[in-house]
């Protein structure tokens, strides 16, 4: 992903060009007096996890992992079901 910096005055003159760059996947940083004030990106880049992965801040898991069922949780569920059954009688 490339980053393009454009001033507010250039943005006014070339909005179509800036939009085209954003559609192509580029980040367009809008500056005012040399300081970044906004970022223009395509809507597809709005997915937070994809952006974090692209920026190298997170990595996807090597393999999918199922959450193990704990025996205590199963026993508690059975006990609760039994209690509710007795209360409904």
Image (cartoon, rainbow, N blue to C red):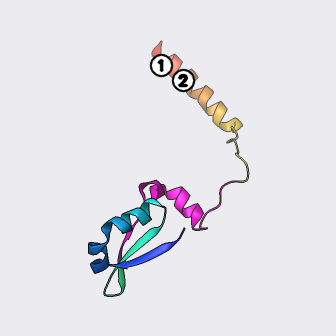
Residue 62 placement (x, y as % from top left): 73, 53
Residue that appears at 56% across and 23% down: 81
Q: Residue at x 48, y 55 (%)?
A: 47
Where 31 sits versus 22, above or below?
below
Front one among 17 and 86? 17
Q: Residue furthest right?
A: 62
Residue 69 location in percent, x, y? 68, 37
Q: Nearer the viewer, residue 42 or 35?
A: 42
Instruction: Answer with left or right where residue 32 lies relative to residue 54.
Output: left
Q: Position of residue 2 (x, y in %)?
A: 52, 71
Residue in the picture at 53% in, 61% down:
51
Q: CA distance from mark 1 to mark 2?
A: 6 Å
Q: Assess whether residue 70 is covered by the magenta stretch.
A: no
Under tag 1, what secondary structure? helix
Q: Secondary structure at mark 2?
A: helix
**In terms of depth relative to the viewer, which is nearer, 67 or 6?**
6
Name the residue at the top extreme. 89
Residue positioned most to the bottom: 33
* Residue bearing the label numbered 2: 83
Q: The N terminus is located in which quarter?
A: bottom right
Q: Is residue 41 left or right of residue 60?
A: left
Q: Write the residue at 31% across / 78% down.
A: 10
What is the span of residues highlighted in magenta in the rendered image?
A: 37-61
Q: Which residue is mark 1?
A: 87
Q: Is residue 77 above or below residue 13?
A: above
Q: Is residue 25 above or below residue 78?
A: below
């Amino acid at each position: 992903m490339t980053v393009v910096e454009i001033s507010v005055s250039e943005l006014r003159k070339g909005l179509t060009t800036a939009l085209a760059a954003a559609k192509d996947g580029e980040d367009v940083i809008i500056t005012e007096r040399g300081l970044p004030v906004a970022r223009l990106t395509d809507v597809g880049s709005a997915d937070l996890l994809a952006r974090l992965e692209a920026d190298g801040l997170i990595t996807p898991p090597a393999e999918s992992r199922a959450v193990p069922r704990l025996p205590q949780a199963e026993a508690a569920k059975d006990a609760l079901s039994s209690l509710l059954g007795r209360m409904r009688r």
